[in-house]
Amino acid sequence: MIDVDVSVDIQPLTAFKRDTVKFAKRLRRSRKPIVLTVEGKARFVVFDAEAFQDWKEQVETVLEVEEALKEEGEGRPAAEVFAEIRKKRFGIPHRASRSR
């Protein structure tokens, strides 16, 4: 989940343009997005590229789970579903069960 602190994570676009290097360092360090405003209204959201990729993968996984929950039938074992998602999304084959 993305936690936006309105006191620091919402900034005017002019401030971002004026001090881009400072904002870029903050984006990389905090991995939190910054909401940029134009005339007092939210207009853009800026992410660090890696943080954006992580966020995007989380959203896609949630959407895939929601889609799977809508499917009719008796269902499938969770391990099978997660293995399919790992393979589809990340190219990771099914992990063998570990015995203890």
Image (spheres, rainbow, N blue to C red):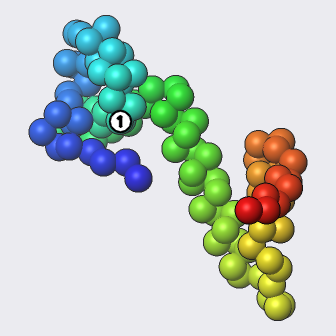
The residue where tag 1 is placed is 32
Q: Residue at x 39, y 21 (%)?
A: 28
Tell me which corner region of the image, top left, top right, bottom left or bottom right, holds residue 82: bottom right
As drawn, 70 above or below 59: below
Q: Going by the image, does 97 lie left or right of 15?
A: right
Q: Quadrant of the C terminus?
A: bottom right
Q: Going by the image, does 81 lie left or right of 27?
A: right
Farthest residue, direction left: 7
Instruction: Find residue 6 and report its horizontal and vertical position in percent.
Output: 17, 43
Q: Residue at x 19, y 18 (%)?
A: 15
Q: Amino acid at mark 1?
A: Lys
Pick whichever, 97 or 8, lies toward us: 97
Q: Residue at x 35, y 23 (%)?
A: 29
Instruction: Find residue 77 and report its horizontal and vertical position in percent.
Output: 80, 77
Label 1 Cα crowd, 10 Å radius (few <14 / some 14-19 / many 20+): some
Q: Going by the image, does 6 lie left or right of 32?
A: left
For the image shown, how many numbered marks are present on the structure?
Answer: 1
Q: Going by the image, does 84 lie left or right of 48?
A: right
Pick whichever, 19 or 32, lies toward us: 32
